[in-house]
Image (tube, rainbow, N blue to C red):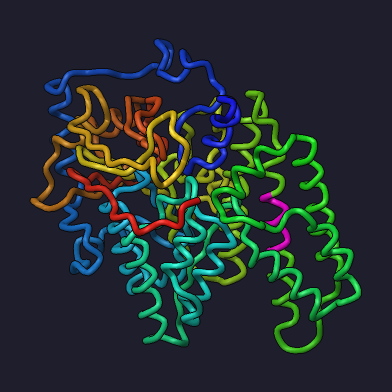
Amino acid sequence: MKHPRTTAALTLLLSLATAAPALADPATAAPRADDAVVRTGDRADDRVVRAVERAAHPLRSTEPSAPDGDLRPLDRMIGDARVVGMGEATHSSRDFFALKQRTFRHLVRDKGFRTYALEAPWSTGLRLNDYVLHGKGDPRRILREDFQDAYLFWNTREYLSLLTWMRSWNRDHPDDPVRFMGNDVAYAGPELHDRVLDHVRATRPAALPRLAELYRGLRPDAPAGPYMRAYLAKPLAERRALAERAGQALELVRSLRPGSGPGAAEAHRWAVQNARTLQQTAQQYAFDYTTQDGVAASMRFRDRTMADNTAWWQRETDTKVLLSAHNGHVTYESDDPRNYPKTQGSFLRDRYGSRYVTVGLTFGRGSFNAVGPDDEMLDANVRRFTVGPDAPGSNAATLDRARVGTGAGYLLDLRTAPPPARDWLRQARPTRNIGTAYPYPAHPSALASSFDLLIHLHRIDAAERLPADGG
C-alpha cells in the first residue's frame, strides 16, 4: 500500500480539475465561515430566476448533430476571440462532452475555429492530430494507451465521436483542416521523445549522442498509468535531477541551427516546442508534494504551462481555438486558491485580454463517472454517481429553476445580465465542480467574476467509457 501522502500527491498532480486538496488538513477542505458564502432560500431568489429567464437564450439540445440555430447567440457573445475556454462541472458526463463537440462544429462552420484543444498530454494531442489530419493510427488504440490514470476519463465514446467527425471534416476539406491538440504535461509519451531525437538525427546528427544521454531515464518504458505513478514515487532529488537534464536538452535543441530547405525553420520551431514540453513534464514532477508551498507552486506551474502551450499552438498554427477543460481551469478565479493559486484562464486573459472568452458549465441533476475520494485512479475503481438537485442557496439550485424554452438548458451572457441577476451572480455561493473523485470538497464560487458566459443544463448523464488497457 502506498503512503497516504504519496497517494494524495499523485491524485492532485494527475487530477484533471480542482478535485481534492492533496495535503490540506481535512478541516480546511470544506468552506469556512469567513468564506462569505451567500445562502438564501428558494423563494428569495424568485426575482433572480425571472431575470435569468428574460436574458438567457434557449439551448435546445446537446446532441452534436442537432441543428445549430440555437447556438447563433454565442457568435455575438464571443466576438473576435482567438481562444474560447469551455468548462465542465464534472469530468465524465456525456452531455458536457457532446455539447462541446456540438459547439466546436458550430464554431468551425460559422466562426472559423480550427483547433480543438483538450486538457490532455501534449504528446497524446500530437498522436491524435496525426489521425485527424492524415488518418494515421487508430484513435481507439491511442485513447486506450494514453488516457490512463486520471486521463482515463477521456477514453470515451463521446471523444471518439469528436475525433471521427474531425477526420471526416478533413477528408472533405483537405485545404482547410481542423486540428486537435493537448496542452497538458503530466505525461510525455515515447513518441514525443522520438520526434525530438529524430529531428536532431536528421538535421544535426553530431548532437544526437549528447541529447540521447540527457534524455536517459526519461523516455517511458511502461504503460502510461504505471509510468506516471512510478515516476512520482522516485525520490525528490532524482526527479529534480531528471528535470535539470531535460532543461539542458531543451537548451541544446534550441541552440542548434535549423536544417536547410523548405519548411526547415518550421520544423525547428516544432522540435524546440516538443523539447520544451518534455522539460515541462519533468519539471511538473520536480516539485515537493509533501509541502503546501510545493503543492501550490506545482499547480500554478501546471496551469501556466497549459496556457503557454495553448498560446504557442494558437500562434504557430494561426487558428482559433476551442479549449476544453474543467471549470476550475478555464475560470478566471480559483475557487481553491490555497492549492490552485492562479488558473489557466487567468493566464490566458493576461495574454489575450478580451480575445480570451470563458464559458462555465453548470447542471441541475444527473450522473457522471468518478472514483471514490480514497481510491487509486484505476479503471477498475471508476463508478457511476448520480446526484439530485443541489441544496437551496447554491448556484445550481437557483439556476435550475429558470426555464428558458423546453430544451436541454440555456446560454447566458454573465457580462450583460440584468439586475437583480447581475448582483446575485457576483456573490460566492456553493457550486458543484466535480473532478476525478467524488465526494469532493465544496468551494464557493462567484460565477460572474469567474466566467464571461454560462451554459446551464438541467440534466446530465454519465459518459460512455470505452474498454481500457489497464494501467
Quadrant in which the N terminus is drawn: top right
Residue 381 appears anywhere in the view: yes
Instruction: Between residue 227 and residue 318, name the one nearer to us.
Output: 227
Farthest left residue in view:
406
* In the rendered image, the vertical position of residue 379 relative to residue 440, given as above or below: below
Q: Residue at x 18, y 69 (%)?
A: 67
Residue 75 appears anywhere in the view: no
**Residue 386, image x and y in percent?**
22, 37
Q: Quadrant of residue 274?
A: bottom right
Q: Residue at x 37, y 25 (%)?
A: 442
Instruction: Between residue 59 and residue 437, name the one nearer to us.
Output: 437
Which region of the structure is painted magenta? 274-281
Instruction: Between residue 210 and residue 327, name the one nearer to us.
Output: 210
* In the rendered image, the vertical position of residue 441 relative to residue 240, given as above or below: above
Q: Residue at x 47, y 35 (%)?
A: 333
Magenta-span inclusion, residue 277? yes
In the displayed structure image, the side of residue 245 where residue 189 appears, left or right: left
Question: Could you tell me what secondary structure mostly forms the magenta stretch?
Answer: helix
**Residue 262, image x and y in percent?**
72, 88
**Residue 185, image x and y in percent?**
60, 52
